[in-house]
Amino acid sequence: ARAVVAACAALLRQNCAPRDIAVITPYKAQQHEIRARLDRDREIGSMSASILVGTVHALQGSEREYIIVSFVRSTDADQDVVTSVAKTPGDSVALQEMYEESLGILKNFRVLNVA
């Protein structure tokens, strides 16, 4: 949520209209967290009301010039995401490659089908 607020603030500093910004996230709890942080942000201020924040389903069919996608990761801050998800050593290697090189769901079409 912090990164989303920073991205919105950066767009606004570049003179993007807040009504041209949308934030998409897969979960309602994340949507509420982002909205709360946008509303509290001093730099964004009252412009936050014009920034559209919603879930993938809620924003389906909406159009904005700038789309920020907020993926949610739920692990402890000091937990290694690769080894925490891996079930076998082979999984660990595959996850490590995705983690180091790219966002896996955008690189691996087989993962995108189930995302």
Image (spheres, rainbow, N blue to C red):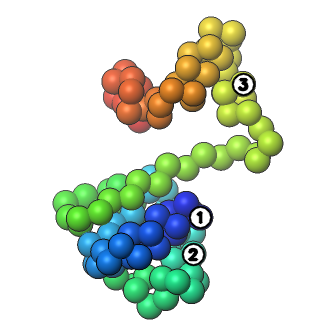
Residue found at the far right of this picture: 78
User: What residue did someone put label 1 on?
Assistant: 2
Gap in angstroms between the C-alphas marked 1 and 3: 25 Å
Please state which of residues 75 and 10 is positioned toward the viewer in this rendering.
10
Q: Which amino acid does label 3 sit on?
A: Thr
The CA distance from mark 3 to mark 2 is: 31 Å
The residue at 80%/42% (across/down) is 78
* Left or right: residue 15 compared with residue 43: left
Q: Taking the image as drawn, is residue 27 in sight?
A: yes
Mark 1 surroundings within 10 Å by alpha-carbon count, few (fewer than 14), some (14 through 19), many (20 or more) = few
Q: In this view, does 44 lie above or below 86?
A: below
For mark 1, give the secondary structure.
helix
Q: Where is residue 41 in the image (x, y as percent from the top left)?
A: 56, 81
**Looking at the rendered structure, which numbered label has been put on residue 83?**
3
Please state the horizontal and vertical placement of residue 51, each as a whole percent of the image. Answer: 37, 76
Between tags 1 and 3, which lies in front? 1
The residue to which callout 2 is attached is: 37
Marks 1 & 2, CB-CB < 8 Å contact: yes
Determine the secondary structure under disc 3: helix
Q: Are marks 3 and 2 in contact (CB under 8 Å)?
A: no
Labels 1 and 3: the sequence-earlier one: 1
Q: Examine the rendering and report whether any part of residue 53 can be seen.
A: no
The residue at the point 55 percent across, 60 percent down is 3
In the structure shown, which secondary structural element does the residue marked by tag 2 occupy?
helix
